[in-house]
Image (cartoon, grey):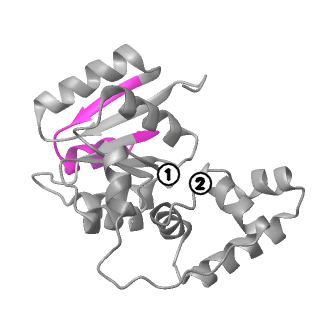
Amino acid sequence: MSDTKKVLAVVDDHPIVIEGLKFLLKTHADFGQVFSFTSGAAFMHFSRDNRADIVLLDISLPDANGVELCREIKSRSPETVVLGLSNQAERSIILQMLESGAGGYLLKSTSADELLENIEAAQHGELVFCNEVKKILAKPGRHPARQLPSLTKREKQLVQLLAQGKTTAMIAAELELSRFTIDTYRKNLLHKFDVRNITELMVIMMREKLL
């Protein structure tokens, strides 16, 4: 984990899930504080005066839709990493969470080791999925497959670095290019693959096993 103590919040309406996660995180992860909330309203009240670095967010809450709550959290605190944590394994819900700004999606059936590894990777800006979710995203969607454009060597480098969660500045330094050039590459990739954002691009890359 990072040297700086992080604050993690668990938002789930099942007490046994909360207690299990809190025990796991306090025992095996180096978080400064772990808070838990059984409703979306309780977490949003907390977030008025506090910021969580990582939020493990259930999709089905008694008072909120996880997708909408994720969007609200990211709107209020863009730096907060929201990870969907649910029993729901529907492709459409996973994609909705990603479109709402989630930094990944994990199933509650995920092993403890895999959960901890994904949380750590998410802290470094990586887009994370448990193995079962990767399999779901790798399956073709309802829409007919289309011929994907080819990637240049430089574009492949950029995609790999984006998948690692690196910022424009970090990529520019690593590839010894200007930030303007990197931004141009990013925009070209979005246009080339006809996607709205980098998250959608990463989903395609994973589905086509290009990452």
Q: Which residues are magenta?
A: 33-54
Residue 51 in sight in this render: no
Between discs 1 and 2, the one toward the N terminus: 1
Q: Is residue 211 visible?
A: yes
Q: What residue is drawn where x is 79% and y is 66%?
A: 154
- Residue type at the position of mark 2: Ala
Q: Nearer the viewer, residue 42 or 32?
A: 32
Image quadrant occupied by the C terminus: bottom right
Q: Residue at x 33, y 74 (%)?
A: 141
Residue located 62% across and 81% down the image: 149
Q: Is residue 112 left or right of residue 197?
A: left
Q: Residue at x 35, y 23 (%)?
A: 25
**Disc 1 and disc 2 in contact, CB within 8 angstroms:** yes
Would residue 97 be counted in the magenta stretch? no
Q: Nearer the viewer, residue 203 or 58?
A: 203
How far apart, in angstroms, are the residues tagged by discs 1 and 2?
Answer: 7 Å
The circle on residue 127 is: 1
Position of residue 132 in the picture relative to residue 151 (left or right): left
Q: Position of residue 173 (x, y in %)?
A: 85, 51
Amino acid carrying label 1: it is: Leu
Relative to 170, say whether 188 is above or below.
Answer: below
Residue at mark 2: 163
Q: Position of residue 179 (x, y in %)?
A: 82, 64
Q: Secondary structure at mark 1?
A: loop
Tell me: residue 13, above or below residue 169: above
